[in-house]
Each structure stands twice: as structure tokens, then as C-alpha cells.
Image (cartoon, helix red, strand yellow):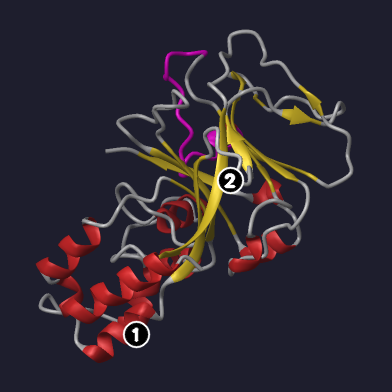
Amino acid sequence: MTQNTVDALHALAREHLPAEIAERWTGLLRPGLGLVNAGDSESDTVVGRLGGQPELPAYEQWPVWEGHGPLSFIASLDCAALPSAALDIPLPTEGTLAFFYFDGQLDDGEALVLPDDPDSWAGARVLYVPSGVPLVERAAPAGIEPYPEIRLAAHVETTAPYLWHPVVDREFAALPDDHPLWSDDFQEALWDLPGAGHRVGGHADPVQDDVESEVAWGILGSPPSGDPRIREEALRWVLLAQFDSDDDAGMMWGDCGTLYWLMRPEDLAARRFDRAKFTWQCG
């Protein structure tokens, strides 16, 4: 595990929180894989890429949102190359994951993929190709301009939950307004840490509010915001991957936003990537 991220978060908690609360909060930290531009360095193991042309089985049809058109290829990950043993989710240790999203190229952004609109869920897909299946490079369909290809390397990092995440609420129950977690110093110290960027596993880094509750709200049919079922359902979901806006790859999701794919751990263990759910947020 990357020592600097572990040390930074533990030191931050010790500095700004009482000892007992710091210990409980650091108990919520989870390992993730940060994805960064591998550049031209031969010392970095390439674990995947943003953009370019995807490699898919010859039999696999290009993902399409019926009535809207083909999705754009966002990223692929080589599961065998990822240091997934460091994670606490059952990520495949072989095969390839490919992420596709209807990014508005065909309709100037008119149709949106939203967690509370089941008719839009086909606008974001994850394809899993097991190891040993022959792959061929596929050209993008007409009207889709591929993003520039950026090779990705991975490093293990420690991730903190969003302060309003259901796991924080579960650990600390109802928090009074003067609880140390709400102190300006602690919150500002968290916000001063470097942004997450692209990530596999760990806690999602939301731009707005926790993404697990967004997905849960959509699955439950948009109940009132105080419905306790939202928290219960949100706790069943974990981050599979998030892809940030990226200048090098020419990717801009709204106003410097991020794309998120989430799964239930049991579906991830069963390789049911058709059950992945998507949301996105921007500033």
C-alpha cells in the first residue's frame, strides 16, 4: 500500500480529531488503485488506457443505446496487470474490462444517462472479456470520434469516505452539529488533499454528493430523500471505477465532472458486469 497516502490520512485524523474518533474514522479507510498517465516511462506497468480504439471479441457488438445510437469508448483495463490483490473488492484477476458511455457526440448532449431514469441506463456499459478470448481492434462507428489514447499505470492508494457517506453515518450514528467530523479544520484538511482522478475500487470521490445514494435512489424508483431504504441500498454498492475529466485524453464530463460505475460485491464476484450501475457528477 502506498505509504504516503496511509500516513497522510492517519496524520490528518490524529491532528484534527479526538483519538477515539480518529481511530473509528481511519477504520473506514479503504484501499483503491489510482490510475495515472503512464507516459513514455518503461518503468511503469501499463494496466489499461483511456480512449483510442477498443479491442473486443469479433462476435461482440458495439454497445448501442437503442433509439439514440452507439456509445463512445472511454477506457479499458487489463485485469491481470492491475495490482488487484491490494483491493477489498473481488475484481477479476484476468481478462479485460471495457467501459462505454453515451457522451453526447451524436446529439450535442441532449440525452443524458441518469441513475433515476431506467430508460437511459443503456447509455453506459461495462463489458468483461475473459482471458483467452481472441480480441480484434474495432473502429468507432460513424459519428463517433475516438478520444486520444492515453496509457494508464496504477498505484495503490488509501481512500477516505465522503463525510456524508452512509458508512460514516452508520459508524457514528446521528452526528450533532458540533461533532468533530464537522469541524472546519478537519473538512478543509480533507479538501486540501490531492483529487482522486481516475480510480479502481476504494471509496468514490464524489463531485457533489455520495454516488452510492444516487444509484440507490434510482434503483428504488426515486423515493423521498429521507426514505431509510436509500441508505440501506446505498450500503450494498461499491465503486468499480471512476474516470475523471482528463485534458490529455480530451475528456470533459460536463463542468470538470467524473463518470462512476458501481456494483454490488456479489455481482462483481459473479462477473455480472451487466448489473453495473452508472452515475456522473460535475461541478
Please tell me which residue is depicted at 64% across the width and 8% down the height of the picture: 142
Q: Does 250 appear above or below 20? A: above
Give the amino acid type for the residue marked by disc 1 in the picture.
Arg
- In the visual, does 272 lie left or right of 265? right
- Name the quadrant of the C terminus: top left
Mark positioned earlier in the residue sequence (2 or 1): 1
Please give the name of the residue rendered at 19% of the width and 87% of the height, measured from the top-left corner: 18
Q: Quick check: is 108 in the magenta stretch?
A: yes
Q: Residues within 10 Å of mark 2 (few under 14, many from 20)?
A: some
At label 1, counting other C-alpha atoms closer than 10 Å, the crowd grade (few under 14, some 14-19, many 20 or more) is: some
Residues in magenta? 106-122
Residue 105 on the magenta span: no
Q: Amino acid at mark 2?
A: Asp
Q: Quadrant of residue 248?
A: top left
Q: Give the SS element for disc 2.
A: loop
Q: Which residue is mark 2?
A: 44
> What is the count of numbered marks?
2
Q: Position of residue 172 (x, y in %)?
A: 30, 82
Residue 14 is labelled as none
Mark 1 secondary-structure assignment: helix
Residue at the spot of label 1: 24
